[in-house]
Amino acid sequence: MNTKPDHFDEMRMGDDQVRPPYANYKSWFDGQDPGRLAKKSKEAEAFFRRTGITFNVYGQVAAEERLIPFDLVPRIISGREWTKLSRGIEQRVRAINAFLHDIYNRQEILRAGRIPIDLIARNEAFLPQMMGFSPPGGVYTHIVGTDIVRTGEDDFFVLEDNARTPSGVSYMLENRETMLQMFPELFSRIKVRPVSDYPKNLRRSLAASAPKSCGGKPVIAVLTPGIYNSAYYEHSFLADQMGAELVEGHDLRVVDGHIAMRTTRGYKQIDVLYRRVDDEFLDPLTFNPKSMLGVPGIMDVYRAGNITIANAPGTGVADDKAIYSYMPDIIEFYTGEKAILKNVETFRCGEPDSLKYVLDNLAELVVKEVHGSGGYGMLVGPAASKKELADFADKLRARPSNYIAQPTLSLSTVPIMVKKGLAPRHVDLRPYVLVSPDGVDITPGGLTRVALTEGSLVVNSSQGGGTKDTWVLED
């Protein structure tokens, strides 16, 4: 797919002048020896390999561990731009929490007819077991990753909301650590807002969300599916950085109405469980009886108010891509305000008129599964062959309500380093948000994912994308 000529270049203006956020960096870059930068790039790869910063690729003959390619050129966002973004993100996250509380309690938004009842009643992410129950502190989404794309100077769109178990924050932290080690002089020259306090803030936010039954300092643990999970590196990294225990389901059991973890001195009570296990596998007594990853009886302990599960079970309703299309209405319903950040126009294929439009214009659209993630099960129409388009059309006709479609946006570009110097590539951004009864904390920056292939719009690491450090300037 060729890059559209009218895409927004975040570094350069039309007359080849450098935009203000990049001016200081570009001046530094122009004075560097290309050979030194190439050497630094190899050093970064060696550092990531040595540290074990990998992810697993599923769906291959053998799921292999890969390095996510890292680009040395930072993505730079001005303080003014970040102020607007963070205001919009906070508004959205607060609305999502209000929506989840409503859906599992009074369901006023359904009574008001602002969202079709079928969209909730037939939603596989909706958990009837959460009805009539409020999590400790009223927080459903303790950790949120909001995917944002840019198409112009002041045009930011939310591509999707990750409200279940958003991943990638370890790459944000390691990308910054790598840049600090390799180019310390840059951070003396350019004032960049730090991200290194994320683990401390995560721990503080989770502790603030502990249940009322917690008597003293909350005990926090990270629940991982185990070493074969694609994000296992991140699970162990975050547990280590927070000073929390990393546990698997077989390490936990119900003791005296609480969840306790096995230690060398017997079982120790846990107050907050940051789980990286999907709802279906969380409790074999409540959900999938074949699950070996969860804790039998944890939902009873949870509903009794004796543990906080982050994120709350059932939050997947909020990052369903059909629900996403109603987010402007959801924000207005719960906040009384218009959405600060725009949605991408979305066609719900379960609606006959929308399905007809999507089938007629498949070659120009991006089609996604409503519960899909990681770039799997997605069709990028302009990059698809005739056979791929025909096969996907059959899938749409067979299960229309399983898909949504969106126009192919002309994503902004930022520079990456290639042999000839700097070249533009398309990007998105995933800022990370922490929510507790004490408030909302947004890390300044986030994970920038970049499509390393010229003209490509697919940034997912599982589909060949890379990452780069994201700088928010101290304006």
Image (spheres, rainbow, N blue to C red):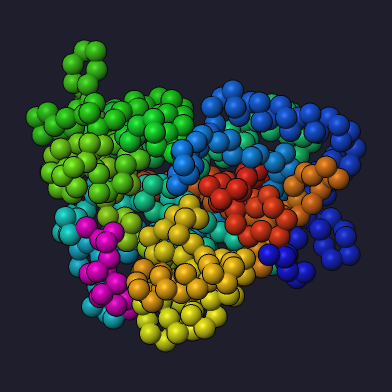
Q: Main secondary structure of the magenta part?
A: loop
Provide the residue span drawn in magenta.
114-127
Let me know if residue 115 is in the magenta part. Answer: yes
Question: Toward the viewer: 293 or 376?
Answer: 376
Check the image and name the residue furthest to the top: 265
Asked whether, in this view, residue 331 is left or right of residue 128, the answer is right
Q: Is residue 255 left or right of residue 84?
A: left
Q: Is residue 259 above or below residue 299?
A: above
Q: Residue lying furthest bottom in this view?
A: 353
Estimate the x, y position of residue 414 in percent, counting from the top left.
72, 53
In this picture, residue 107 sits left or right of residue 320: left
Residue at 63 percent across and 35 percent down: it is 176
Q: Is residue 227 above or below residue 297?
A: above
Between residues 440 and 76, which one lies in front from this camera angle? 76
Residue visible at 56% across and 46% down?
A: 461
Residue 24 point in image, percent of width and height: 82, 45
> Horizontal and vertical percent for residue 453?
69, 52
Please give the name of the residue rendered at 24% of the width and 13% of the height, measured from the top-left corner.
264
**Numbered label tally:** 0
The residue at the far left in this view is: 256
Q: Position of residue 274 (x, y in %)?
A: 33, 38
Is there any visible trace of residue 151 in the rendered image? no
Answer whether residue 421 is magenta in the image.
no
User: Residue at 12% of width from left, 28% of height from top?
Assistant: 255
Quadrant location of residue 289? top left
Residue 281 seen in the figure: yes
Q: Is 193 located above or below residue 222 in the figure?
A: below
**On the rendered image, what quadrant is the N terminus found in?**
bottom right
